[in-house]
Image (cartoon, rainbow, N blue to C red):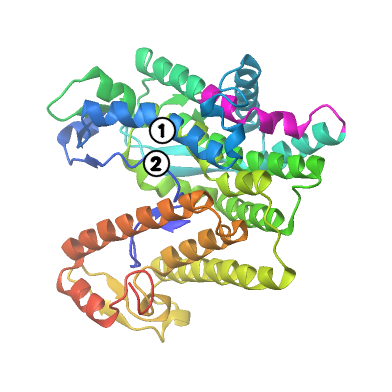
Amino acid sequence: MVLDEFINARTHDQEHQPHRIGSHTLKLKDDDDEGKGVVQVHSKWNNIHLSLVCVLLGVSLIALLDCCRSSSDWVLLGSGGSVWDWTSVSVVLLFTVLQVALYHLPVGQVTEGKMGCNGKRLKYKLNGLYVFLLSAALLSALWFGGVLRAGAVTDRIFSLVSAGMAVSLLLSLALYLRPINTHASAQVHYHNTADPLLRFILGQNMDPRLGIIDVKHFLMVRIGFIGWAMMDLNYLLTAIEMKTSLSLSLLLVVIFHLIYILDFLIDEGSVLTTKEFTEEPIGFIMILGEFIWIPFFSSLPVYFLLQRPNQIHFLSAVPICLLFGVGFLIYYLSNEQKDGFRRNPDDPAYAGLHTIRSPSGRRLLVSGWFGWVRHPNYLGDIMMMFAWCLPCGFSSIVPYLPALQCFHLLRQRANEIEDSCLKKHGDAWREYCRRVPYKLVPYVY
């Protein structure tokens, strides 16, 4: 739900995944080799940083999930649970195979995305919404039929994270040892290095494909976002089984998450213009993020409430719902204004909006939503994410970590966008910043 580029008449660089860890600080360089199927990439990572991130990512996630439980049940202290079992590996593999099969459903539109290195636009199948609905229906049918006990899946949460790490490692090794080379997918060469560890972790291929399946698109949408929704639904079913853990707080967080995910799936094409999708190769760190970080870290507030139920009064839920609703409206309406102006800046609907003419020939909006704060869509995201943390109460900072990470990433992305816009629009951008002094939060920041 996050937009990568400030509003103008032609640019549309959208980031819809604020929790994603795939910020590799990669920078694509303009190079004549790109037309030959090679992309020169400069990375600021070194082997020590890469190794630490890969090792600590899964361990830190298990530790955070552990912190949601009673200290007497901490897995890392050997008090309960297991961090590995083959049943969990089977669950992760079955879910992945199911998503592969549903990807081929003859529903949804096929759309064009980024330009391939062969001069033709790559095509993507956008049926994520239908796949999610079928996956949710299958989960519900198995549960109602007594075939599946949601609590048994939740009890394996730590081994599921480990299984996700193992499957990520195997898939990454397969892509590294047997790279998928197509005429449309560019190969990645890292500037001043041929380090195999760098190529394995950050990736050596921009857009690998298996038949009609774009691997990057599949992992981001089907494994990441739909996996997140499935974990939320499983936690909800677990709470129903436990009875004592089902609360208004948990219901609110699950509903907020599902609204957020459904909005993304309805506008699935937005992922095709994200920075991760267009500029970053796919390697172990991205695959690992999709298999464990998005599904398990994003659903952390729900798991927290499952382990530590927090009862809130109906009257307390009202302002929380208002915060989420207002945040969603700010996000949605500001994006509608941006996209509409981008498509047709001469539309009479925008006749009353003030603009600044950029030396590049484009016009920058300086009124409406973008006259209130420079990144209103980011503000909407922040409000929604803190809204689904508030039902957890204030006994621990753990359920707030996804929102805090999001705020940090959005602030970082806003700075990157502003640097880019300053170079692109020069004095026009300086004038815009003078007229609209607040970046994210009106009268605060």
Residue 312 sits in which quadrant?
Answer: bottom right
Whether residue 220 is visible here, answered yes or no, is: no
The magenta-colored residue range is 145-164
Identify the residue under disc 2. Answer: 21
Label 1: element kind = helix
Q: Residue furthest bottom?
A: 352
User: Above or below — where is 335 with respect to 88?
Assistant: below
User: Is 147 a magenta residue?
Assistant: yes
Label 2: element kind = loop
**Residue at image coords 56%, 55%:** 395
**Residue at image coords 28%, 29%:** 50
Front-most of 79 and 49?
79
Circle 1 crowding by C-alpha within 10 Å: few under 14, some 14–19, many from 20: some
**Residue at image coords 71%, 55%:** 251
Residue 425 sits in which quadrant?
Answer: bottom left
**Of the two numbered discs 2 and 1 in the rendering, the one whose residue sits closer to the viewer:** 1
Front-most of 390 and 98?
390
Identify the residue under disc 1. Answer: 57
User: Is 441 a magenta residue?
Assistant: no
